[in-house]
């Protein structure tokens, strides 16, 4: 295998990630024809196809599956060595990152984190946006358009090229509403909860075929799903809650964030007979950036701003109730 070079290994990795020969070639600065010829030479050196076309994508052969992670490690080390090794100086870096965050995920304080990153790395370009609704951001991770995904959806079990770190769960324990709500007083009954129009902070939940965990439980218990609509970002949700009679089911921390965005909001514990739903949160990144010093620095900054409690504000503990997972 003396004829094998690192770019050929990088081509296999890129082909598996993008599922497109033209995109893999573009990532390496090759024409599709040159990429095809390079891949054929690698196959001849290994005596195996390694990756084979199936439909509109590519599948690894058994030998390809055995060597893929080794290819990734070698390619990553090659990139690090060619870019100056493992040292990273934020103050002088002009790296370009993209963080995608689903609506309503406030368990990482992106506002404060962005400010800290800009202060320590003034030349860095940092994009923060929502992931695409169809794939939830996972297409962007594979296509290199997203570096870090903050999401409520765990990676597929067979996604061996992705790394996922569990963030603090959101446990929905409270109802957030205006202090001058015309129908709800100092406590919240199940009848009052079901009669109101509910706002959701995530279109992903709104258009999920199964609905939220809370609505699934309500339907199963014979109450029927809530009347709901989606409003985001968080600042708009806070404003609408404070100026209308709409309500939102939130975690204690989400409630504290909403109250920082708008005056005139309060939190009430959910009715005791309503189970508290739990939603998982994840930070996900691709293996190609796993050992990259700039990307490791970015992920560490995000970890610094992960929050697990509500901070200042109402912290009334709700009555004991079972917890259901979203």
Image (spheres, rainbow, N blue to C red):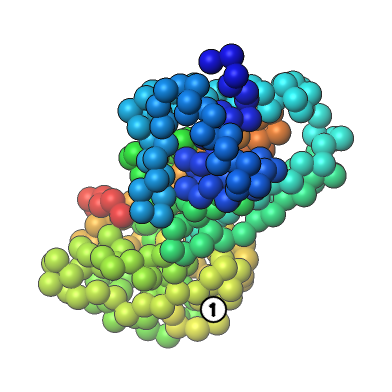
**Residue 272 occupies which quadrant of the picture?**
bottom left
Locate the C terminus by quadrant. Answer: bottom left
User: Residue at image x 12%, y 72%?
Assistant: 222
In this orientation, which residue lies closer to the viewer: 321 or 44?
44
- Corner quadrant of residue 318: bottom left
**SS state under label 1:** helix
Relative side of 238 to 216, left or right: right
| Residue occupying image coordinates x 71% and y 33% | 294
Residue 6 on image: x %, y %:
62, 25
Q: Nearer the viewer, residue 201 or 276?
A: 201
Q: Which residue is mark 1?
A: 240
What is the x, y in percent for residue 223?
17, 74
Please indicate, yes or no, whether residue 253 appears anywhere in the rendered image.
no
Q: Nearer the viewer, residue 219 or 92?
A: 92
Judging depth in this view, the residue of 178 and 229 nearest the camera is 229
Residue at (60% x, 19% y) in the render: 3
What is the x, y in percent for residue 252? 45, 54
């Amino acid at each position: 295998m003396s004829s094998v070079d690192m770019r050929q290994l990088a081509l296999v990795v890129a082909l598996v990630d993008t599922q497109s020969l033209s995109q893999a070639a573009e990532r390496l600065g090759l024409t599709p024809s040159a990429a095809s010829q390079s891949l054929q030479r690698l196959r001849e050196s290994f005596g195996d196809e390694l990756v084979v076309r199936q439909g509109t994508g590519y599948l690894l052969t058994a030998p390809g599956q055995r060597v893929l992670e080794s290819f990734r490690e070698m390619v990553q080390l090659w990139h690090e060595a060619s870019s100056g090794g493992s040292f990273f100086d934020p103050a002088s870096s002009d790296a370009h990152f993209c963080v995608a965050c689903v609506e309503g995920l406030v368990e990482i304080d992106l506002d404060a984190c962005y400010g800290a990153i800009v202060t320590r790395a003034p030349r860095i370009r940092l994009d923060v946006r929502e992931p695409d609704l169809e794939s939830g951001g996972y297409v962007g991770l594979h296509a290199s358009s997203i570096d870090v995904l903050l999401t409520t959806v765990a990676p597929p079990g067979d996604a061996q090229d992705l790394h996922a770190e569990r963030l603090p769960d959101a446990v929905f324990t409270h109802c957030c509403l205006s202090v001058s709500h015309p129908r709800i007083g100092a406590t919240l009954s199940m009848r009052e909860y079901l009669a109101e129009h509910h706002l959701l902070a995530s279109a992903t939940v709104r258009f999920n075929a199964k609905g939220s965990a809370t609505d699934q439980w309500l339907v199963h218990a014979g109450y029927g799903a809530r009347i709901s609509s989606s409003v985001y970002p968080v600042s708009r949700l806070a404003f609408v809650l404070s100026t209308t009679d709409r309500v939102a089911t939130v975690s204690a921390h989400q409630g504290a964030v909403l109250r920082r965005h708008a005056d005139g909001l309060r939190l009430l514990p959910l009715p005791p007979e309503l189970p508290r739903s739990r939603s998982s949160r994840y930070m996900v990144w691709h293996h190609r950036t796993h050992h990259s010093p700039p990307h490791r620095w970015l992920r560490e900054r995000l970890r610094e701003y992960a929050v697990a409690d509500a901070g200042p504000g109402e912290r009334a503990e709700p009555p004991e109730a079972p917890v259901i997972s979203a």
